[in-house]
Amino acid sequence: MKNHNNIIVNKAKELDIPILNYKNIYNTIGDKAFFSHTIVNNPEKLIDILESGKLISSKLSDNSTMTYESDKLIGMDNYVFLALGMGYTKKESYSLIFDAEKLINVSGVNLVKEDLMKIETKFINKFLDNHLDEIIKIILNNNVKLKKTFENKVKLIFNGKTGIYSKYFGKNAEDVIKNFINAINLKGFGGVDAEKEIINQFTILTDAILSEKIMPAKLRNELIVLLQKEVVEPNTITTRKSIKAIIDELWKTNSRQLKKFLPKNKSVPNNIIELRIPNELILKDAIIGIYTPNK
């Protein structure tokens, strides 16, 4: 870890970017509005970003294993996302800090007023319930693919282990597809989603159904059109003047809250305002600091 920190500090000096920590951050950047891109506890990823000089979308990075299929339906994999204020950053995280004024001038920038992931879930569940008979046939026809996707995702989430899903692995494993079909037949997708666990045991499979490798093109395109109309368009601001006005007002009225770190026991802020940059963001265009968890 110490070697990683030395590399980060040296790279920051080379790029003339201040190193920030929870003691000096606001003395260094002052009270101006900023956005953050959180890298959790992954100094290797931060080093890769600094060496490349840019942030890139998940599609460009081909990081499909970490991108939800539901996000792909609304084009989120085409963007670099930044949160107003500290956003997802905990004191233990690494984060890149960007000047809001400079970001507004980046080509193609837009602002998302609400958490699209929360909004889209309701529409996706309703769509799947409205096509329930067809969806069940799709699940049965793709039983092996879906089961493999489930197994791979679980091991990715739990670093090679099975965590809360252990009953679906091993010699006397339960059939996850059978349980999934029984649950949606009984409660529908909306009902299943409403009864979440820490990580809902069927969230992985519900998301996997949406893949272009699983869902027929006609049905998937119908869902994409629906989500674009009901989720993306009503909640996206595209003009720079409007984006600036929203950021200025939010910072004026709520900067104290926006500057707080995310508590240890939370993974998502109560309210999140995100700026989206298509494809890639060149660091030097707007970066004002690198937050590290080191004192």
Image (spheres, rainbow, N blue to C red):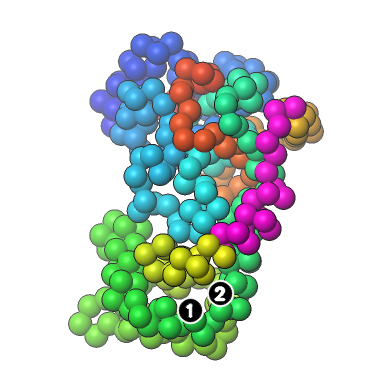
With 8 as the anchor, is 182 left or right in this view? right
Q: Is residue 53 left or right of residue 116?
A: left
Give the residue pinned by disc 1.
Answer: 135
Q: Mark 1 belongs to which amino acid?
A: Ile
- What residue do we see at 51% from left, 85% from top? 133
Q: Is residue 109 above or below residue 75?
A: above
Where residue 78 appears, as percent x and y from the top left, is 48, 42
Q: Is residue 112 magenta?
A: no
Q: Tell me residue 160's x, y (percent).
A: 25, 60
Range of residues picked out in magenta: 223-241
Q: Is residue 280 above or below residue 168?
A: above
Tell me, yes or no, if residue 24 can be seen here. Answer: no
Relative depth, front residue between 254 and 178: 178
Asked whether the residues under the numbered discs 1 and 2 touch, taking CB atoms below 8 Å apart as contact, a structural biologist would say yes
Q: Secondary structure at mark 1?
A: helix
Q: Position of residue 16 (x, y in %)?
A: 43, 11
**10 Å neighbourhood of mark 1: few (<14), some, or many (≥20)?**
some
User: In terms of secondary structure, where does tag 2 sit?
Assistant: helix
Quarter residue 212 falls in? bottom left
Label 2 neighbour load within 10 Å: few <14, some 14-19, many 20+ = many
Q: Whole-percent x and y of residue 177?
A: 37, 81
In the picture, the disc for residue 128 is: 2
Quarter of the image with the N terminus in it: top left
Q: Residue drawn 40% across and 79% down?
A: 139
Distance (Cα) linking label 1 and label 2: 7 Å
